[in-house]
Image (cartoon, helix red, strand yellow):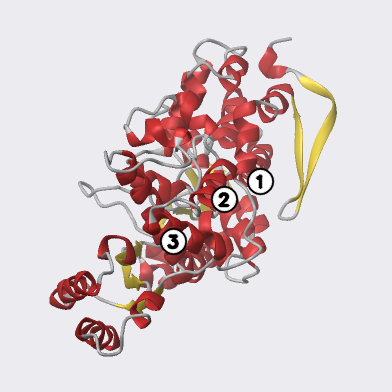
Amino acid sequence: MAYQDEKLDEEKVFKDPVHRYIHVRDRIIWDLVSTAEFQRLRRIKQLGTTFYTFHGAEHSRFNHSLGVYEIVRRILENFKGQTYWDEEERILCLCAALLHDLGHGPYSHSFEKVFDLDHEDFTRAIILGDTEVNQILRKVSDQFPQDVADVIHKTYSNKLVVSLISSQIDADRMDYLQRDAYFTGVSYGHFDMERILRVMRPKEDQVVIKESGMHAVEDYIMSRYQMYWQVYFHPVTRSAEVILSKILHRARDLFFSSDYAFEFEPKHFESFFHKDVSLKDYLKLDENVVMYYFHTWQEESDEILADLCRRFINRDLFKYIEFNPGTQYRELMDLKESFIEAGIDPSYYLEMDSSSDLPYDFYRPGEEEERLPIHLQLPSGELKELSRQSEIVEAISGKKRTDHKLYYAKDLIHELPDDSKAKQRILEILKG
């Protein structure tokens, strides 16, 4: 029997708080879960610094990746025997679903911004490189690892397969919305996934939704909208991300300074600082390692690094106010000058941060990040783009919302002498 067709002697299950059970019968899936690269995802939080805002948000990329696999497995069970679906693509879909987040690093998005990295590049490198994951995928064929990487990279020839993993209504989003809602304790991310799975239909280039399932899809899109603004872009979480970024920037600046010698050398970060990160170095760095450095750096002689690490470890975060850099540019410059005059380094204790989201969009040729729209299948077989049928979706379609916050170390300002002119100017600007 070919490896991709091998089944386990008995079905294995993972008990899951979102899907109740995650079912594994294929040998290749069980083998992939057991690899060092996949097990590493246990040490990468799904929501980065969100645990500082919602204390239950300690779940991992490991949890989420299994959840995406389970949703795709269930979708493909429903696709059996349907036109446009090729059962030969089944194992490819399941492997891509399981491995789609394999390259995420510690505190993923903040970390990527500081070091100018892309987790998708590392996902690809793990799948195609000298890894346990690659060895298992090559048991199917020499081409199979490339096919899995192409599905995740959205360059695979069968766009229907790609759309299951990456589209505006895919298994990835359906899992993380429900999982993140569960672990944060909010009610926004809940929608009728069972209904959506029942009305999904394979087409030549994408999954479509029977028109009778339109209201379940509306609920899903609104859930996504609410989760972004109530959870993912929460200002307290963003404050923790700001401090995390400042720590990494400060450590990098000190590393290249001829005037500073670390008491605890950042060996795990050296290749990141030099922008020459090998796959081996990347896989060694997880959130446990990062937190160990932060704990240790609280004792460094550099006051800024020690203070930032203490703040992150003890959740002593920056305060924030609404602040529009477009209309308040002069005030921002005045603030920076006043911080410097007061002896507070604005590079580390003042930060302008913006978040934006586009909850749903339809295809707009020539624009950046063209989005394949969600199509409804009418009883006649005709396809209609979702926002043409749904007034709710039409109301938010193509509308990007942006939010601006100014983060600052309030305690350092209040420690300044009351007769300090710089302090008075800072307080006046911040009061607006």
Q: Which mark is residue 63?
A: 1
Q: Is residue 146 above or below residue 367?
A: above
Q: Considering the image in quadrants, where does the N terminus appear? A: top right
- Name the one closer to the observer, 234 or 295: 295
Q: Considering the image in quadrants, where does the C terminus appear? A: bottom left
Q: Which mark is residue 307?
A: 3
- Residue type at the position of mark 3: Asp
Circles 1 and 2, Cβ within 8 Å, touching? The answer is yes
Q: Left or right: where does residue 281 sit relative to residue 5?
A: left
Q: Quadrant of residue 40?
A: top right
Mark 1 or mark 2, earlier in chain: 2
- Find residue 173 and report its horizontal and vertical position in percent: 53, 52
Label 2 secondary element: loop
Mark 1 or mark 3, earlier in chain: 1
Residue occupying image coordinates x 47% and y 34%: 268
Residues packed near mark 3 inside 10 Å, few (<14), some (14 to 19) or many (20 plus): some
Instruction: State the CA–CA distance, disc 1 to disc 2.
Output: 8 Å
- Name the one closer to the observer, 221 or 288: 288
- Residue type at the position of mark 1: Asn
For mark 2, what is the residue? Answer: 46
- Find residue 213 and report its horizontal and vertical position in percent: 57, 60
- Find residue 416 and report its horizontal and vertical position in percent: 32, 81
